[in-house]
Structure formats: structure tokens, C-alpha cells
Image: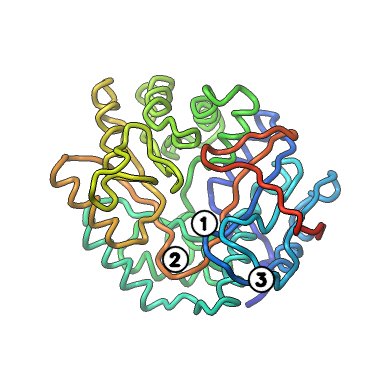
Amino acid sequence: MPTLPQSHLPYVDKYFIRSRRILEREGLNPRVTMQVFFRNGPGVLAGVAEAAELFRAASPLLEHGGQVWALPEGSSFAPLEPVMHIEGPIQDFIELETLYLGILTSRTSLANGIAPPDLTAVAAKARSIRALLPTKNLLYFGARHWHWSMEEAICQTVIAAGFDACATDAGARAAGLAAGVGTIPHALVLVFAHHVGPQQATREATLAFDRHIEPECSRIALVDTFNHEITDSLATAEALPGALWGVRLDTAGELTGQGGAADAGQPFVGGKGVTVSGTAAVRKALDAAGFGHVNIVLSSGFGNLAKVAAFAAAEGRHGRLFESLGIGGLFEAWCATADIVRVEGRALAKTGRAFRENPRLRRIL
């Protein structure tokens, strides 16, 4: 695998590129701390040196007083233990998240005995998801789940198997599509939370997206950052009457979505993360408020065929619940996750995540 592409931008999830543009135009560039961890483990960490090379080559982070701290290459780590902290102005590295997570994920997966993605198996899973959901919009959101050098091959595979879009320009173009797709990540909402407060952040981030992003791009609000899925769905629908295409639910696996059942006695119906009951609660609230035209996009965990089947069956019982799925987990991997956990030195994070000290981290940049 080559270590770095000639340009990182084609391999970046589109919503990070759009977020950088929004931050520049809004004049927002706070210093943040990004925390990286794995849910898998215990295991051995790999890819640290390659990730450091990416920061050196593609970011002015060091010139602006930024720092990167990590466990040394080859270190053991435990599930949820921070393996990296990145500190600096958000505009300096928001576009790098897809690549450094893909580097850490792929190298660490290989170091712990996970095989590279099998494209035949990826195609089979993609076709199975399409068969379960023949009329839904299926988006491949898995660029961060493996090394950038496989992105084009994986995207060609999933589009040929029936998916509709990919999140990176490189993957989309390789698959014969015009460009990658994507709207708002948690990082953008958290910067707005620092700027206007958590209660207004989802609405204001969506309004900023509407101000600065080309009108042909659908307006889709990310509404789970502070676990106010219903409240923030209604607030953004009210702020963009007639213009909001949809809301995205990506509720963290540590939380029960607002309005969802804590335990419905059936897998994926209740409990934590994105569930049928949580989705149905948002759908009901939007419909009751006169926003039946606002669609729902779901992401998180939909590489699991049993979860996809549960949602397909739920639509048979409840009627229309969602229009699109963002899906990343089409192959086995130990996936690195990144979250903003501090802004300008103060605690500020997605609900369910928080800054965690790790005295084993060493400065690498």
C-alpha cells in the first residue's frame, strides 16, 4: 500500500470538505482536542507513524502550535482507551479525519489478525442489504474503515452491487458517479456549540450549511449530537421550512435516542444506538408538527444484516420510517473512532463521549 496519496482531498469524506468551507466562511477556527479510540481490544496499535506522516504532509497544524500525542507504534491498548489526542485549530485538520482513521484502522486490524477486505464478500453483503431494502437510498460511508488505497476498489464494488452513492470523490468517480456525498458531521455541530451554545448548535450549523453550500446539495441536519434527536429535528425543520430534506440519526452506542424505548425486548427495536423505536419517535414527532415531508437518514451499525432486516420489518408494521441508510461496516475491521472532546481547553463533546486522560500517550508531533 502506498502511504500517502498525491492529494488527500479526493479520499476525504465529503462532509469534512464542506465543513471546512463553512468554518472558513463563518470565521470559526477554535482550538480543539480530538480523541481517538477503538471499541475493540485488547490489542496492538499500528499506523501511528503513517498517521504522523499525514499530519506533517497535509496540514499546517505544527506551524500553528498544534500537537499530536499517541501511544507508541506497537503498543498494547484496551477497548475505549485513548490511543491518540490531536490538538490545534480545527480548520487545520478537520479534512484529515477520514485518512488518519483509515490508516489506524487498517494497520491496527492487520496487526491483530484481521484480513484485508474481501471484495467478493463485500459485494455479497451489499447485495443482501439491497435485497432487504429495494427502494431505499443506500450510501457507502466506510472510507474511514480501511486504508485510503482501497477506497476506489471498494466503492466500485458496492455501487456495482446496488448502492447509490459514496462519501468520497475518489470512490464515487471510480464507480462512475459524479462526486461524493455528505452533509454535516458531529465536528461541525460541536464547533457551533462552542460558538452559540449546545441548545442552538444543531440548528445554527444547519443554517450555516444552507448559507454556504451549493443549493443542489440536499439539506440534511445531523440531530443526535446532544441526544436531543426529536428536539433538534423539530428545531431545524422550523428553521428551514420547506428547505430541509431530512434529518440524520447517528445516536451513539452508549445512549438511548430521545423518545426511544430503553428496552423493547427485541434486538434493534429498543436499547442504545439507532433503534426502531427511536426512529419511530422522531418520525411521529415530525409528522405531528406538520413536517411529514422531512425525511430520515439513518447511520451507525447498518453493516449488520440483522439490524437492516429489523428496520425493514419495522416499516411493514409502522409504515414509512426512513428514506436512506449510511453504511460503513461491509467488512470486518477494528475501527478507530474520533471525537472532539474539548474546545478552547473546555470540555465539550458529543453526549456519551468525554475527554479521558491517558498518561501513556507520548507526543509524536
Q: Which mark is residue 155?
A: 2
The residue identified by callout 1 is 168
Residue 286 placement (x, y as % from top left): 29, 27
> On screen, 46 above or below 235?
below
Considering depth in this image, is 139 or 115 the residue closer to the camera? 115
126 relative to 77 in the view: left or right: left
The residue identified by callout 3 is 46
Query: Few, some or many C-alpha atoms within 10 Å of disc 1 (few <14, some 14-19, many ≥20)?
Result: many
* Proximity of marks 2 and 1: CB atoms separated by less than 8 Å: yes
Q: Which secondary structure, mark 3?
A: loop
Asked which colour scheme the image uses, the reply is rainbow
266 relative to 236 in the view: left or right: left
Q: Residue visible at 14% across and 47% down? A: 316
Tag 3: amino acid: Ala
Q: CA distance from mark 2 to mark 1?
A: 9 Å
> On screen, 25 above or below 128?
above
How many callouts does the rendering have? Answer: 3
Tag 2: amino acid: Cys
Q: CA distance from mark 2 to mark 3?
A: 25 Å
**Chain-order first, disc 2 or disc 1:** 2
Q: Which secondary structure, mark 1?
A: loop
> On screen, 115 above or below 228?
below
Q: Which secondary structure, mark 2?
A: helix
1 or 3: mark nearer the eye: 3
Q: Where the N terminus falls, by quadrant?
A: bottom right
**Chain-order first, disc 2 or disc 3:** 3
Residue 254 placement (x, y as % from top left): 46, 46
